[in-house]
Image (tube, rainbow, N blue to C red):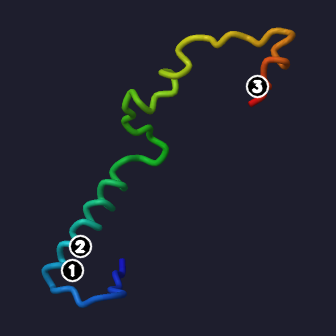
Amino acid sequence: MTIKVVRGNPTPEELAAALAVVRARAAAASSTPPGAPGTRDAWADPARIASHRTPQPGPTSWSRTYWPG
């Protein structure tokens, strides 16, 4: 792995801190198998939205889709 500083002049301590973050993120990404589902909170759960059936449109529903303004 090669890291290149494009702008600025970081101190050795700043460069070491940035490298530690990159290595920690890479280690965390490699520890989870690809395609494994992550933890999802309830807000992102699609079942929350589609928990009940929506009513089906009737034969004259097309006429109620236009509301003149």
Point out residue 30 in the picture as x, y percentages from the top left corner.
36, 55
CB contact under 8 Å: marks 2 and 1: yes
Q: Which residue is drawn at 53% across and 15% down?
A: 51
Dot 1: few (<14), some (14–19), or many (≥20) neighbours within 10 Å? few
Residue to which mark 1 is pinned? 15
Q: Residue 67 carries which label?
A: 3
Q: Residue at x 85, y 11 (%)?
A: 60
Quarter of the picture containing the C terminus is top right
> What residue sits 81% from the left and 15% below the top?
61
Name the side, left or right, on which 29 lies relative to 57: left
| Alpha carbons under labels 2 and 1: distance apart | 5 Å
Ranked by sequence position, the earlier of labels 2 and 3 is 2
Q: Nearer the viewer, mark 1 or mark 3?
A: 3
Q: Is residue 66 or residue 17 the one in the foreground?
A: 66
Label 3: which secondary element = loop
Quarter of the view holding residue 50: top right
Q: Is mark 2 on a helix, strand or loop?
A: helix
Q: Do the residues labelled 2 and 3 touch (CB within 8 Å)?
A: no
Nearer to us in this view, 47 or 39: 47
Question: In this picture, is 51 found above or below 5?
Answer: above
**Are the two marked residues, 1 and 3, in contact with CB atoms closer than 8 angstroms?**
no
Amino acid carrying mark 3 in the image: Trp
Mark 2, residue position: 18
The residues bearing labels 2 and 3 have C-alpha atoms spaced at a distance of 56 Å
> Where residue 54 sits: x, y (%)?
64, 13
**Image point (24%, 66%), residue name:** 21
Kind of residue at badge 1: Leu
- Nearer to us of marks 2 and 3 is 3
